[in-house]
Image (tube, coloured by chain):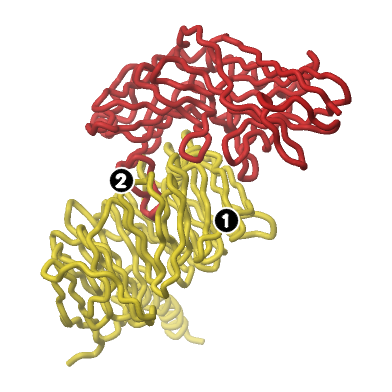
Amino acid sequence: MKRYGILFVLIGLVAVLWAVIWPLSYEYASNGFGLFIRGTINRGIEFNSQNTQITAPSDGEVVFECSEPTLLSGFPIPEGSMLVCKNQGDILTIYTGLITAPTVLKTPQFKENDLLGMTQNVPDARAYAYVFDLKNSMYLHPHHVFPIIKETNAPQIRAALLFNETGEVQLSQIKNIKQGNWYLKCKAIDIVNPAYTDGVKRVTFLLNGMEKYTIMLDTIAVKNGKLVFQANNSWSSDVIDSNGFIVLGPAYITKGKSIITLVLEDFYGNTKGYSWSITVE
Amino acid sequence: MSDEKKNKKTLLGFIFPVVLLIALFVLPANLQKESYYKTAWYVSLEEIKPFALPEQTLNNAALIPFVTANRIGYITQNGTLVMNLERMNGSIIDKNKWSQWNSVGDEKLIKNIDGITSKIPAHEIPFFQRNRIFSVSTDVLRLTEYSKDGKVLWNYQLPCHVSAFSVNDSLVACGLVNGDIVILDNKGNEISYTKIGGSRIEVILGLAISSSGNYIAAITGIDQQRIIILERGQKNYRIVKHKYLTSNFRNQVNIYITADENYVLYKDMSGIGVYGIKRNENIVLPIPVDTFNIYEGHEGLGICLVADFMHERIVYIMNMPQTIVGKIILPARNTFFTLQDNALLFDDGSGIAALFFEKDMQ
């Protein structure tokens, strides 16, 4: 528990000490951290913008640059380019899909707001920005370090199901379930603006008002080749399934009437709760 | 013993090692008779309409895969074109299979020359290495290996973005932008995770795994950059040798372990470095390169080092560790190069030519 406290303090310190700007306006952001897109969990922010400047969010220097569709070994490079920068506070910022500025290649050291590159000059140009915490070896939601967006939209549920070894049921349709251990799985998003859909920061599963399971989705680490998230204050690898559902539980549901509640919190302080009443046989 | 005899003996004792040292290290090596090459054939790709691989079963040992700026296909060592397709946005080929796609969002069909096909899901990017089929997710943070018939053998979430990658028949080595090296076995299990360290900024810029898997060589770090050799121990890979370099590259760097596992060749500030693994060589060959590739053909030919520098591509024929036997300047529009036994195949932008090396020609 203490370890996680220290981790939160460290991430908090990074956020406070790292006076930064957005590398390109969040108005160009399309898909946020933790979303399940194109078969994978997004560990950064996707931007859609043609021929737009990408500038340094803070002082730093280039660590690695590749402007080829593959590494020398044939390993693909996303969107045909990658730029890795080390910034103050042991943070790596990683960009893919940009045309690196010649100035950065000549002089690897840069100041905040210096030009790092441009998004590609094609209509469907896509670029990604990632924030990697070197000390804790994990990807951070860029909102930990980029300036906060002021928005008041509450996060939303797209689907919510209960499941166990016998099968799965849609919470919006089912009224009766059998007594036993049940998992809850859901898809949750936060619509920041009409173009930008973000993931959610925290998901909490309550049974009759009692907190059963909480997942934090603001960092993504990898242990032994599996994604791990903070679930009930410990690292868990079974948090997001292969279809992008957030999995919470299990919780033992006893006979009688029960209220299942799911509380979502976004990165901007907005929360929303969803409740379902069920009868357990 | 008289003083004169004593002096003679002392003199001989001094001269003999000096002569031996000169003979070994100063005089040129006793080279084998020079190798000669002759042009065997030239096949135009542009004049021939694209055509697919015939239906009948083919002897794959005879097929040489090629990818030029516009074409992808197979050719035989005697210059018979067996497949000649127009290149699409994504094109990969090896001696047994190929795949082409227009968009990463498409499902990719892997076609084996024996007729078996398999599918890689949309939004995965396939690539072939050492006859193995891999794919990465579009963010390149999940690595998957597939069997020939399209079954997922394993997948592995990468801890960080990859900056260097190397494969042999059974292992996968990933060098990460945070300076760590991960080694996976052929089931995707992490058999080694090494934090390299030793520089102001950690990053892996080049990585090579030897054919046996006993050695891994890497170019690591910035301020100071190092070449390191890791050897496989009982539990993990550990650094057994390293050298600080004068370079401070911030992009990918070629590094290669020779098939006999005696030497590492790597890009250095002033040429191509040769660093002994089991030996003590520590040489820089004055060959200017931006990038290079190594091809090892039949034993007598030595090593073919294909160096790209300032839009020029030169093939150096070498005897390790430092004898350059000869060089060939490739055509300006060259994309494809390979060495098959004693045949050197390359393109000039519109066709493919073959040179055959022959020894002891009079």
Circle 1 SS class: strand
Q: Which residue is mark 2?
A: A68
Chain painted in yellow in the figure: B
Kindly identify the amino acid type of the residue bearing the numbered disc 1.
Answer: Val
Q: Specify the quadrant of the image occupied by residue B77.
A: bottom left
Q: Is residue B348 left or right of residue B231?
A: left
Kindly identify the amino acid type of the residue bearing the numbered disc 2.
Answer: Glu
Q: Is residue B110 left or right of residue B74?
A: right
| Residue A86 in view here | no
Name the residue: 17% across, 82% down: B40
Residue at mark 2 shares a chain with residue at mark 1: no
x, y (%) of residue B265?
A: 39, 60
Name the residue: 59% across, 20% down: A201
Q: Which residue is mark 1?
A: B240
Q: Quadrant of the C terminus of chain A?
A: top right
Chain painted in red in the figure: A
Tell me if mark 1 has few (under 14), some (14-19) or many (20+) residues whose alpha carbon lies within 10 angstroms of its own. Answer: few
- Which circle, 2 or 1, is nearer the viewer? 2
